[in-house]
Image (spheres, rainbow, N blue to C red):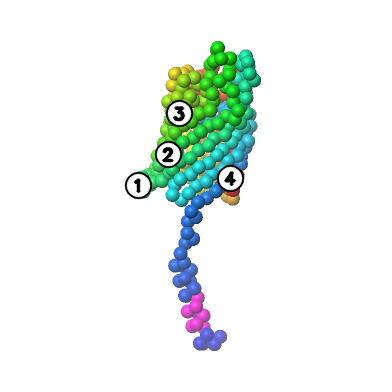
Amino acid sequence: MNKTIFPLIVLAWACGSAQAQTAPASPEPESALSFNVGVVTDYRYRGISQSSRNPAVQIGGDYAHKSGFYIGAWHSTIQWITDNNVVQTATTLKGAGELDIYGGYKGEIVKGLGYDVGILRYEYLGNTLEDTGGSKYRIYDNANTTEVYGALSYGLFTAKYSFSTTPLFGNLRSQGSGYLDLSATVDLGNGLSVVPHFGAQSVVNVPTAAYNDYSVALNKDFGGGLVASLAFVTTNADKTNYARPIDSKFLGESAGVLGIKYTF
């Protein structure tokens, strides 16, 4: 090789390497929009089956701004409202879908200590739960529920409290009910994580509806937005209060739940 060309090649390579090392990172996008679709063998919410221990299909969408503001919507098939038809004396009960609409703000109080505050509206589309038993023997409020929530997270751990500003999931005069959610996310590597959880639901004016729930979930992230989960869920809920009217099936019974979700 020509002796004059060789030093020039080395110099060009060195300059190129230096530029690559000091090149500025891509700027953070102002906002992000994502969608998700999934299926579970049993839709469990706070330990109680919303799908009568049957599979459920779920879809959602989220918008997040780099400031910390976010909004989203999520829908799942359910069955618990129409299951109450066995005690209905007038109008056929409706409510085969749950639509959650939420928004909030998250950030850091100090480095490592995060917060998340927001509001969540549960809409049970077209539900007529308040008609159960007829107007003279009314035993439920409208199932639609609004909650405000606040959460703190530090390292592996998250503590969240939700407070209902309306009657809770159809329980009569139950506004002011609360739910405490304690969880941790343990990264096992290779896309695997374990999430233990403890929850405590209080229900104003309906003490028999209060209970605790416990779960542990194993999640596997396959990359590309695909995540699978296997969870064991159990509760100490009252078997009479949380039994399906048509056949007394206990909706808080211990069970394993499989799920798969794709986010894009």
Q: Look at the picture and state if 11 lies above or below 21.
A: below
User: Magenta stretch?
Assistant: 6-13
Mark closer to the chain start, 2 or 4: 4
Amino acid carrying label 2: it is Val
Contact flag, marks 2 and 3 (Cβ < 8 Å): no
Foreground mark, 1 or 3? 3
Q: Is residue 35 visible?
A: yes
Element on which disc 1 rests: strand
The structure residue drawn at horizontal position 49% and vertical position 60%, both measured from the top left corner, is 26
The structure residue drawn at horizontal position 53% and vertical position 16%, both measured from the top left corner, is 139
Q: CA distance from mark 1 to mark 2?
A: 16 Å
Amino acid carrying label 3: it is Ser
Give residue 95's position: percent from left, percent from top.
61, 27
Mark closer to the chain start, 1 or 4: 4
**How many residues crowd around disc 4 within 10 Å: few (fewer than 14), some, or many (20 or more)?**
some
Q: Is residue 200 visible?
A: no
Q: CA distance from mark 1 to mark 4?
A: 30 Å
Foreground mark, 1 or 2? 2
Give residue 206's position: percent from left, percent from top.
46, 18
Give residue 116's position: percent from left, percent from top.
42, 41
**How many residues crowd around disc 2 within 10 Å: few (fewer than 14), some, or many (20 or more)?**
some
Mark closer to the chain start, 3 or 4: 4
| Residue at the spot of label 1 | 110
**How many residues crowd around disc 1 within 10 Å: few (fewer than 14), some, or many (20 or more)?**
few
Q: CA distance from mark 3 to mark 4?
A: 27 Å
Contact flag, marks 1 and 3 (Cβ < 8 Å): no
| Residue at the spot of label 3 | 164
Q: Nearer the viewer, residue 128 or 55?
A: 128
Amino acid carrying label 1: it is Val
Q: Which mark is residue 117?
A: 2
Foreground mark, 1 or 4? 4
Q: Quadrant of residue 44?
A: top right
